Image (cartoon, coloured by chain):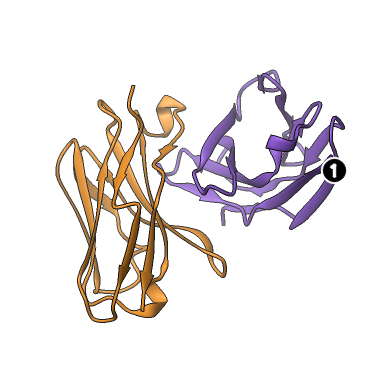
Amino acid sequence: DAGVIQSPRHEVTEMGQEVTLRCKPISGHDYLFWYRQTMMRGLELLIYFNNNVPIDDSGMPEDRFSAKMPNASFSTLKIQPSEPRDSAVYFCASSLTGFRGGDTQYFGPGTRLTVL
Amino acid sequence: AQKITQTQPGMFVQEKEAVTLDCTYDTSDPSYGLFWYKQPSSGEMIFLIYQGSYDQQNATEGRYSLNFQKARKSANLVISASQLGDSAMYFCAMRTSRDDKIIFGKGTRLHILP
């Protein structure tokens, strides 16, 4: 089975540009999570979806960040306009069920974003 | 408040020795799950092991075992017979029945010495 797929793997952009990160969860997984990892702040949950519906976006840092899940096999995280402090590794993860399923989250390889 | 604490920022261990990575957690929810993930230098997050709060026995997965002490709220990861490839960052995480989010600790960087 293919794991979680993220693209691009690396992104270098200039401040002010729009950045779109993409994620394809594991087929059949109902939950999708977006995380950001930095040295200073560690691993932070930005937003998560259940059956394509955003459930909790309290971790989204500002209005510059937005996430969508138009269907069960695709999600995007958009930053517009990007700033240098957005430089981080962005992970997408998916899980088959929520907590009651006792299921774990499986992570994609991450997208390393550098904003100059 | 729910919290995961990993007090060891870094550890150095000789190859073939057993390793224990500490993790304590805090939650008032009686139903929860505990996870360990490995992040090698390549950056991916690899799921290692899971322990449910109602599981009677400690979880084991190959060389990995989870030393679950519920009364002490600890969930230490034990790696038996360490290998050079075990050098990585290790994260302890928790999920409760309150919602479906996983919260992560700050991690422990493990270095295996030849």
Residue B42 seen: yes
A44 with respect to A77 (left or right)? right
- Closer to the camera in the image, B77 or A8: A8
**Chain in purple colour:** B
Q: Is residue A112 above or below residue A28?
A: below
Q: Which chain is orange?
A: A
The residue lying at 80 percent from left, 51 percent from top is B11
* Quadrant (top left, top right, bottom left, bottom right) of the N terminus of chain A: top left
| Left or right: residue B1 compared with residue A1 | right
Instruction: Give the residue displayed 56% in from the left and 43% down from the top.
Output: B94
Where disc 1 sits, the SS reads: strand
Q: Which quarter of the figure is the C terminus of chain A placed in?
A: bottom left
What residue is shown at x 53% (from left), y 34% (from top)?
A: B47
Give the residue at x 19% y 42%.
A74
Q: Quadrant of residue A77?
A: bottom left
Q: Where residue A53 sits in the image (x, y, percent)?
A: 19, 46
Q: Quadrant of residue B57?
A: top right
In the rendered image, the residue lying farthest to the left is: A70
A72 above or below A35? above
Residue A35: image x %, image y %?
40, 54
x, y (%) of residue A39?
56, 66
The residue at which mark 1 appears reads as: B13
Work out whether residue B32 can be spotted.
no
